[in-house]
Image: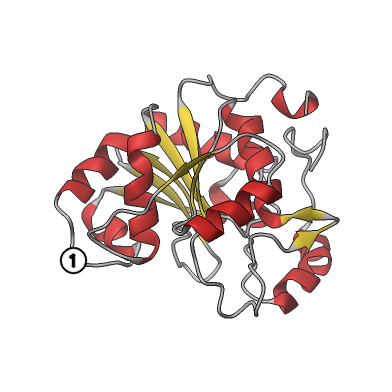
Amino acid sequence: MTGDRETSMLPASSLTGVVLAGGTSTRFGPTPKATATLDGRPLVDRVVRRLWRVTGRPPVVAARSAAKRELVADAVSEPVRFTPDADWCGGPVAGLAGSLDAVETDRVFVCGCDMPLLSPAAVSWQAARLQTAEADAVVPMDEEGQPQLLHGVFDRDALASLFETRPGDDRLRVVLDRLTVDRVPQHEAPQNIPLTRSTVNVNTRCDLRSIPTMEAAIGHAPDPGEHVRN
């Protein structure tokens, strides 16, 4: 555990990680996706450990039900803070809106529990970009031009103000529609920032099995958050 908490790439007071882990994972199969393993480590644990690395603080985990929270708690090897979903909406918006009361920093990084290649360097780079951007959020775009909202850095107060209006839309798309978003094509990331790799997520068991092949195809840029442990 010691190595995972070496000096963060950002001041510890500046960023909190929020992990959305309350989904039903219907495409993944009968067992929870969050606790599926890659190289012997649960997906959610890989995400939590990498967020600890970049933020220096416990991530906030939105796991919806008591049963899901218990599963995630058993799967993680670092302290986390669990939060209930907001009661006025559903889906990922409920998890994100419910998590904000536990966020004490001015910026928040939001991701899914199914991102085993999450890069501390990419998270840090996005957070630094938000500091200078005239925007409420920094969100990468995939090769098809689709926003990767579950790899986004957001201004905490902007999100809180949005959710105070209780938008009648449970899709995370409402964030794009209501906030000023700096949409970053992946080719704009510096060469040493593995943004494409970091945004990879797992939806099916086939996706999980293909991670090593996908990783090799994308390439593995050196990442200062990965040299200690996964």
Residue shown at 26% from the left, 63% from the top:
89
Q: Which quarter of the image is occupied by the C terminus?
A: top right
Foreground pick, 184 / 150:
150
Q: Amino acid at mark 1?
A: Gly
In x, y percent, where is residue 92?
A: 40, 61
In x, y percent, where is residue 117?
A: 70, 53
Looking at the picture, does residue 43 appear above or below residue 190? below
Q: Secondary structure at mark 1?
A: loop
Residue 190, visible in the rendered structure: no
Residue 59's quadrant in the figure?
top right
The residue tagged 1 is: 168
In x, y percent, where is residue 173?
A: 33, 64
Foreground pick, 200 / 192:
200
Residue 104, visible in the rendered structure: yes
Residue 143's quadrant in the figure?
bottom right
Residue 109 falls left or right of residue 228: left
Residue 185 falls left or right of residue 91: right
Dot 1 crowding, Cα within 10 Å, few <14, some 14–19, many 20+: few
Residue shown at 66% from the left, 44% from the top:
119
In x, y percent, where is residue 65?
A: 46, 59
Q: Which quarter of the image is occupied by the N terminus?
A: top right
